[in-house]
Image (cartoon, rainbow, N blue to C red):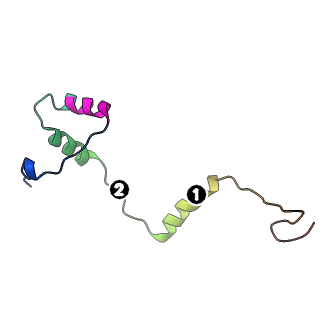
Amino acid sequence: MPSPSRRQQRAITIRSDHELARLALLTRDGRSQMQVIEEVLDRMPLPKPLSDKQERRAHIEAILAKVPKRTYRHHGVDRCGTVR
């Protein structure tokens, strides 16, 4: 698929000086910045499609299992409402 002419391409802003320097190193062999970026993006794995409801729920529950649990007591009353 031919790429659009340079005037029709959208501009990409690189905010990091470090990444801009790396891109300059990668383009020393004559490739354009866009060619380098496209090659890198082509090598990246695509994100997994959304899984079914049970898998998402299991993932959320696994995250919640790591969250510390707290018990709340107010004036001698436990969580079930029993007065001590």
Q: Relative to 77, is 42 on the left or the right?
A: left
Q: Dot 1: what SS?
A: helix
Q: Residue at x 8, y 53 (%)?
A: 4
The residue beneath circle 2 is 47
In the foreground, 17 or 67: 17
In the foreground, 10 or 33: 10
Q: Quadrant of residue 23?
A: top left
Secondary structure, magenta segment, majority class: helix
Tell me the kind of residue under disc 2: Pro
Q: Relative to 73, is 43 on the left or the right?
A: left
Tell me the kind of residue under disc 1: Ala
Query: Which residues lie in the magenta part?
Result: 16-24
Q: Residue at x 25, y 47 (%)?
A: 41
The residue beneath circle 1 is 62
Q: Is residue 70 above or below residue 29?
A: below
* Proximity of marks 1 and 2: CB atoms separated by less than 8 Å: no
The disc, 1 or 2, on the residue closer to the chain's N-terminal end is 2
User: Does residue 20 show up magenta in the picture?
Assistant: yes
